[in-house]
Image (cartoon, grey):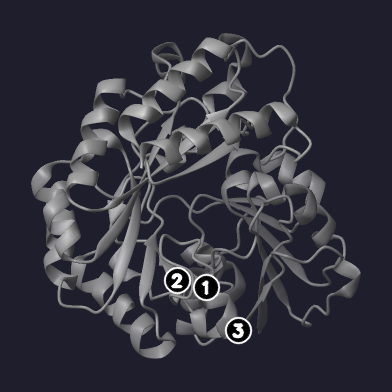
Amino acid sequence: MRVCLINPPQTELRAPTAYLPLGIAYLAATLLNSNIDTKILNLADEENLENVTIPKSDWYGVTCVSATYNSTVELCKVLDGKIVVGGVHPTIEPEQTLKDTNADFVVTGEGDYVFRDLVSGDIKPKNNIVEGGVINDLDSLPLPARHLFPHNEVVNSEGILGCEKGVIASSILTARGCPYSCCFCVKAHEMFRTFRYRSAENIREELSLLINDYGVEHVRILDDTFTLIKKRVLDLCEEIKDMEITWACITRADHIDEEMIYNMKKSGCIEINIGVETGSKRLLELMNKKETIETYVKASEKIKNAGILLKTFLMYDFPTETQKDREDTIKLIKKIRPDKFTLSKFTLLPGSEMWIHPEKYGITKVHQSYFYPDEEDMRWMKYKEELSSVIEGTK
């Protein structure tokens, strides 16, 4: 039995190869543990499928998010074998995915075990849509099968993972799920709400592998809210404080305190990313962020006082956003003085609260689903330049 797991083209994204597709890396590890012949094909930066040689396989597993949906549909047309499509978008829109891709099966939720059981024949579902559900014991999963990827796809030294250019870096997941319900985020869907995390010992094992096998000096933790549970953060910091590695993480401003920050710094944390989105109180409430301007200011002070770099994620052109809202964001940026920022174009994501109830947010037509504005969008460029100038002026 031969299996090929495919990460489809995602050239709509600005840096399609920045992150290893850990989802199929985990999936591959589970298959290999069951002695199933498995290959991985990472087409993240492939612009023309006609240039691709696809390994002959009995089963193909294609991972899909909304940004790669169109390319997934096109990819499935050229696959000759049993096709299973899974990931965030198929979880949200399983029936439509099944129809558009003509796949044999669509897996919703976390497919680590379900896909293996489909391939092995241990389950024979009556329907083409198979529920993977939620895996509670993340330590039970084997570590991602990074060895199935070329070395240059596992590591990155371009300085885009929260470290300086030239530093050998990679990414890891230490938890799954997010309990918050920001209206623009697909993670508000019930399938992604349950927060689960790996043990400190399990994470140390993966870090040791990255250091010893790949020479990794820095990792970016991809959890949606890394500091959600204080005890688990402190346990992890204690476990890895003697390792020769630095790290960056993503979290919320309202889940940070001095003790946590001190221990994170001591264990190698050099950068914290926070989703600020806007400095407008009105928009924060509309977004259901459940955070305040004051929370952002206090969190930024704690981070910078500890000598850790602060990066903020900001959003552009959120529905009903006004010039005053953008001016409020500039005011906030002057207060919190981030070292870095990312300005993303608002995109209406399937599965988000805004997708389900667009009228509630002033959306009268479906927004174009692209993930970065065209470079010729002069309003975006002007706003980005203004933010850059403000940040430079606060240093």
The answer to whether residue 198 shows anywhere in this view is no
Which dot marks residue 150?
3
Name the residue: 43% across, 75% down.
167
Q: Where 190 sits versus 225, above or below?
A: above
Pinpoint residue 195: horizontal percent, then vertical percent. Answer: 31, 46
Mark 1 secondary-structure assignment: loop
Q: Residues within 10 Å of mark 3 (few under 14, many from 20)?
A: few
Pinpoint residue 255: horizontal percent, then vertical percent. Answer: 22, 38
Camera-near label (1 vs 3) is 1
Which of 262/335 is in front?
335
Q: Where 155 sits versus 381, above or below?
A: below
Name the residue: 45% across, 50% down.
133
Mark 2 secondary-structure assignment: strand
Q: Amino acid at mark 2?
A: Ser
Q: Is label 1 in contact with label 2 (beta carbons under 8 Å)? A: yes
Name the residue: 69% across, 64% down.
44
Pinpoint residue 362: horizontal percent, then vertical percent. Answer: 62, 10
Camera-near label (2 vs 3) is 2
Q: Which residue is mark 2?
A: 170
- Along the polypeptide, which appears first: circle 1 or circle 3? 3
- Along the polypeptide, which appears first: circle 2 or circle 3? 3
Cα distance, mark 1 to mark 2?
A: 6 Å
Which dot marks residue 156?
1
